[in-house]
Image: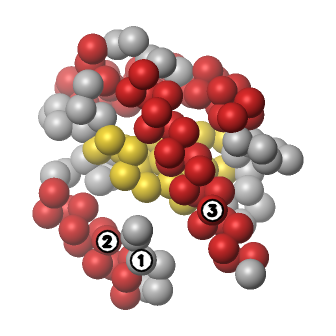
Amino acid sequence: MEGHRYERVSIAIREELTEMIAYELEDPRLHGLEVTDVQVSPDMKKAIISVYTPAQGAEAEKIFELLRAAKGFLRSELTQRVDLFHTPDLHFDASLNLGPKARVKHILKRIERGRPKD
């Protein structure tokens, strides 16, 4: 039963972050950004957010710097929107920013481990 809680929290965080990035961060460089996955640690103190952006190279790195700079704002908004005892610290992961083939491989790996993506 406890595993379902992590899954529900991950889904709630992913949905809220997707909405906040799309509508509240008013930077045109964030257009096309997609929150693909959120992994919450077992102690609920850390969340690794996998993000895909169509930008490549130095432009993609600037986008991740923007996200890291907005981390405090995003976390404070999550505190207000998602009812949690402790809002996890947000860590943005660019490892899935390799394109659709890499994302499919990642999803297949998760299915093999028994953690399918919705």
Is residue 100 left or right of 68 when viewed as pictured?
Answer: left
Residue visible at 24% across and 32% down in the picture: 32
Q: Nearer the viewer, residue 85 or 40?
A: 85
Q: Which disc, if any, is residue 8?
A: 3
Q: Which disc, if any, is residue 1?
A: none
Q: Which disc, if any, is residue 116?
A: 1
Discs 2/3, front: 3
Do residues under tags 1 and 2 come within 8 Å of each other at their CB atoms? Answer: yes
Does 109 sit above or below residue 75? below
| Secondary structure of residue under mark 1 | loop
Mark 2: give few (<14), some (14-19) or many (20+) Cα within 10 Å. Answer: some
CA separation, marks 2 and 3?
Answer: 18 Å
Q: Amino acid at mark 1?
A: Pro
Q: Amino acid at mark 3?
A: Arg
Find residue 102 and report its image quarter: bottom left
Give x and y (percent) for residue 104.
Answer: 22, 68
Mark 1 or 2, nearer chain start: 2
Residue visible at 74% across and 30% down in the picture: 80
Which residue carries the number 2 mark?
107
Mark 1: give few (<14), some (14-19) or many (20+) Cα within 10 Å. Answer: few
Mark 3 or 1, nearer chain start: 3
Find residue 81 and report its image quarter: top right
Does 99 sit above or below residue 28? below
